[in-house]
Image (cartoon, grey):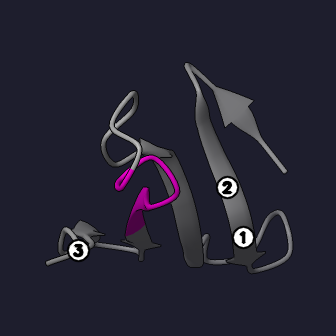
Amino acid sequence: MDSTDGVIDVIHLADRPGTSGHSVSVRVLGRSQPGILTGHDFLDCEIVIVGESVSANFPGDPPP
């Protein structure tokens, strides 16, 4: 797991070094509602996809 500024890569799948550099990661950004008892167990996450000519982040939807 990689951690920078409180962001944790829970899953990181990537090509071998020196190849095309494609990767997919699932990152935990932090608690959804810290300090609120009913929401502190939910986590904000995003999926990050990196390709040769494209890079994208897909934030998760907040819980209802």
Q: In the rendered view of the protein, which quadrant contains the C terminus?
A: bottom left
Q: Which residue is mark 2?
A: 9
Magenta segment boundaries in residue numbering = 38-46
What amino acid is found at the position of numbered circle 1 in the picture?
Answer: His
Mark 3 or 1: the one toward you: 3
Q: Which residue is mark 1?
A: 12
The answer to whether mark 1 and mark 2 are in CB contact below 8 A is yes
Residue name at image x 80 percent, y 64 percent: 18
The answer to whether mark 3 and mark 2 are in CB contact below 8 A is no
Neighbours of disc 1 within 10 Å: few (<14), some (14-19), many (20+): some
Looking at the image, tell me whether mark 3 or mark 1 is earlier in sequence order. Answer: 1
Measured from the top left, where is residue 24 in percent x and y? Answer: 56, 78
Measured from the top left, where is residue 4 in percent x and y? Answer: 63, 25
Cα–Cα span, label 3 and label 1: 24 Å
Cα–Cα span, label 1 and label 2: 6 Å
Residue name at image x 41 percent, y 44 percent: 37
Asked which quadrant contains residue 14, the reply is bottom right
Q: Which residue is mark 3?
A: 63
Cα–Cα span, label 3 and label 2: 20 Å
Mark 1 or 2: the one toward you: 2
Neighbours of disc 3 within 10 Å: few (<14), some (14-19), many (20+): few
**Residue 35 falls left or right of residue 19:** left
What amino acid is found at the position of numbered circle 2 in the picture?
Answer: Asp
Query: Against 59, is 33 above or below?
Result: above
Measured from the top left, where is residue 58 in percent x and y? Answer: 24, 72
Instruction: Find numbered disc 1 in the image and state the secondary structure of the residue it sits on.
Output: strand
What amino acid is found at the position of numbered circle 3 in the picture?
Answer: Pro
Residue name at image x 19 percent, y 68 percent: 62
